[in-house]
Image (spheres, rainbow, N blue to C red):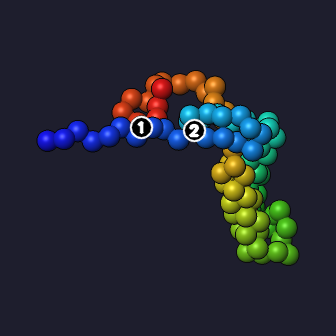
Amino acid sequence: MPKSRVRKKKVYQSKSGSTSSTGDHYEPSPTWVPVTAVSLIVFGIAWLVTYYLSGQQYPVAVWQNWNLAVGFVAMVMSLLILSRWKLGSDRSGPPRHGVRGAD
């Protein structure tokens, strides 16, 4: 049976002109990204817990069930922020064996 040809890897070239054979190199996110996301998660949970434990009188009694929306919107916003979080190419951790393109 004939052997198939080995394909050459495409070289990735960024807009800045630097080249890389893998797409693993990128700048890590600023520090405010995880800090803001965790703060929003804590704020959302605290808002909901306060609402339930106060017998639906606090944080804002006039809003009634809209207090639930405030808590859940804060948590959803944190998930959207975390989806933009990048650790960077120098991330440490156990090697990923069996994954294509791993070290």
The one nearer the camera, 8 or 101, is: 8
Q: Secondary structure at mark 1?
A: loop
Mark 2 closeness class: few <14, some 14–19, many ≥20 residues within 10 Å: few
The amino acid beneath tag 2 is Val
Q: Nearer the viewer, mark 1 or mark 2?
A: 2
For residue 89, say whether it is visible: yes
The label number, if any, that marks residue 64 in the structure image? none
Q: CA distance from mark 1 to mark 2?
A: 16 Å
The picture quadrant where one finds residue 98 is: top left
> Residue visible at 73% across and 58% down?
77
Q: Secondary structure at mark 2?
A: loop
Mark 1 closeness class: few <14, some 14–19, many ≥20 residues within 10 Å: few
Is residue 93 depicted above or below 58 in this figure? above
The label number, if any, that marks residue 100 in the structure image? 1
For residue 52, say whether it is visible: no
The one nearer the camera, 63 or 24, is: 24
Whichever of callouts 1 and 2 sits on the residue coming sooner in the sequence is: 2
The one nearer the camera, 72 or 21, is: 21
For the N terminus, give its image quadrant.
top left
